[in-house]
Image (tube, rainbow, N blue to C red):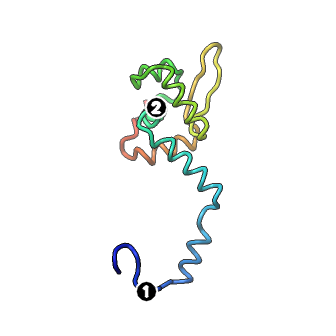
Amino acid sequence: MTGDSCDLLCLDLPQAEEIRAGLLPLPAVETAAVGARALGDPTRLTIAAALASGHELCVCDIAWVVGHAQNLVSHHLRQLKVAGLVASRRDGRMVMYALTSRGSALVAVVLGDSVPAEG
């Protein structure tokens, strides 16, 4: 083997076919990639971690917790919402944000042992 490629073709066809058959369809992979990209930004990952710890927070609380301006936090929350990682609901004049189940699962995987303890 030179570099990163084989010098000869040595395909284990049964194993390769089994793996290929078990792969997610392209739309599911694209959806997963959107979520992964959304958490690839440090600010969005910090916001998601705060939501993982606080469960449901308004923009004011999130902005204070992560130390960023409300307009910046709102921008990132919209991106997390488009990616399907965050949901929102109106409570009077406030909008409350929470991670979706998919968002919670992805944050837990990305942060691993660094996920804030539930409180």
Q: Position of residue 69 (x, y in %)?
A: 45, 20
Is residue 33 left or right of 42 when viewed as pictured?
right
Q: Quadrant of the N terminus?
A: bottom left
Residue at disc 2, secondary structure: helix
Q: Residues within 10 Å of mark 2 (few under 14, many from 20)?
A: many
Q: Is residue 22 above or below residue 109?
A: below
Identify which residue, 110 or 78, lies in the foreground. 78
Quadrant hosting residue 17: bottom right
Q: Is residue 2 above or below residue 59?
A: below
Q: Nearer the viewer, mark 1 or mark 2?
A: 1
Residue, disc 1: 8
Q: Position of residue 63 (x, y in %)?
A: 45, 21
Q: Is residue 96 above or below residue 93?
A: below
Identify which residue, 72 or 109, lies in the foreground. 72
Residue, disc 2: 47
Identified at 52% across, 24% down, the residue is 57
Identify which residue, 115 or 37, lies in the foreground. 37
Disc 1/disc 2 C-alpha distance (Å): 48 Å
Name the residue type under label 1: Leu
Upstream in sequence: badge 1 or badge 2: 1
Name the residue type under label 2: Ile
Identify which residue, 44 or 92, lies in the foreground. 44
Is residue 6 left or right of 90 when viewed as pictured?
left
Q: Position of residue 77 (x, y in %)?
A: 54, 30
Q: Residue furthest top?
A: 93
Identified at 60% across, 53% down, the residue is 30
Identified at 47% across, 85% down, the residue is 9
Residue at disc 1, secondary structure: loop
